Amino acid sequence: MTSNKCHENNENVSCEVVCTHPDVIRAYADQMLSLDRATKLADLFKTLGDPTRVRLMDALAKTEICVCDLAELLGLSQSATSHQLRVLRSSNLVKYRREGKMVYYSLHDNHVQELYRQGLEHIDE
């Protein structure tokens, strides 16, 4: 197995000379992510950047579950659990339904399920 010395030493890996390629720039300039969309995507990843919220997502990737059970499962207060769920809800990552006095949460949709699944696959490689 060969190793890349630059990565082992944590050195910056960059071009040694400044040389742009106008054909590449022309081909992709109109396909670049807008600043607005980039900001929204960065905000989504920031939301997922908290281990407690990731653990909530993990539970919800398995089943719909009520706030009381989520709190117990994660060893959190109901207040802390509700706060983290509110953050996830504001990013459209989870949704809820009310059944009498109970509130049940689940992942918002299949896109969120797939995002979660792919994230796990990536870290497990």
Image: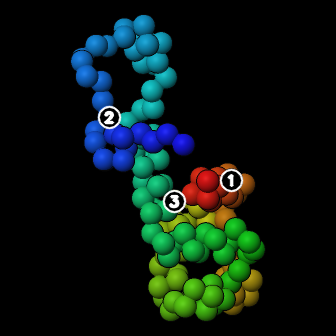
| 76 or 90: nearer the viewer | 76
In the figure, 85 relative to 93: above or below?
below
Q: Name the residue under label 1.
A: 114
Q: Residues within 10 Å of mark 3 (few under 14, many from 20)?
A: some
Mark 3–mark 2 Cα distance, whole angstroms, equals: 34 Å
Residue 24: x percent and y percent?
43, 13
* Quadrant, the N terminus: top right
Q: Mark 2 points at which residue?
A: 13
Residue 51: x percent and y percent?
48, 72
**Dot 1 or dot 3, earlier in sequence:** 3
Q: How crowded is mark 1: few (under 14 residues within 10 Å), some or many (20 or more)?
A: few
Q: Residues within 10 Å of mark 2 (few under 14, many from 20)?
A: few
Identify the residue at horizontal 31%, vertical 13% (top origin).
20
Q: Tag 1, which secondary structure? A: helix
Q: Of the residues shown, which amino acid type is indicated by label 1? A: Glu
Q: Going by the image, does 122 lie left or right of 110?
A: left
Mark 3 vs mark 2: give the one in front: 2
Q: Of the residues shown, which amino acid type is indicated by label 3? A: Ser
Q: Tag 3, which secondary structure? A: loop
Mark 1–mark 3 Cα distance, whole angstroms, equals: 16 Å
Identify the residue at horizontal 42%, vertical 18% (top origin).
29
Q: Name the residue under label 3.
A: 91
| 92 or 6: nearer the viewer | 6
Q: Coloured how?
A: rainbow
Q: Going by the image, does 12 lie left or right of 34?
A: left
Q: In terms of image quadrants, where is residue 34?
A: top left
Residue lying furthest top:
23
**Dot 3 or dot 2, earlier in sequence:** 2
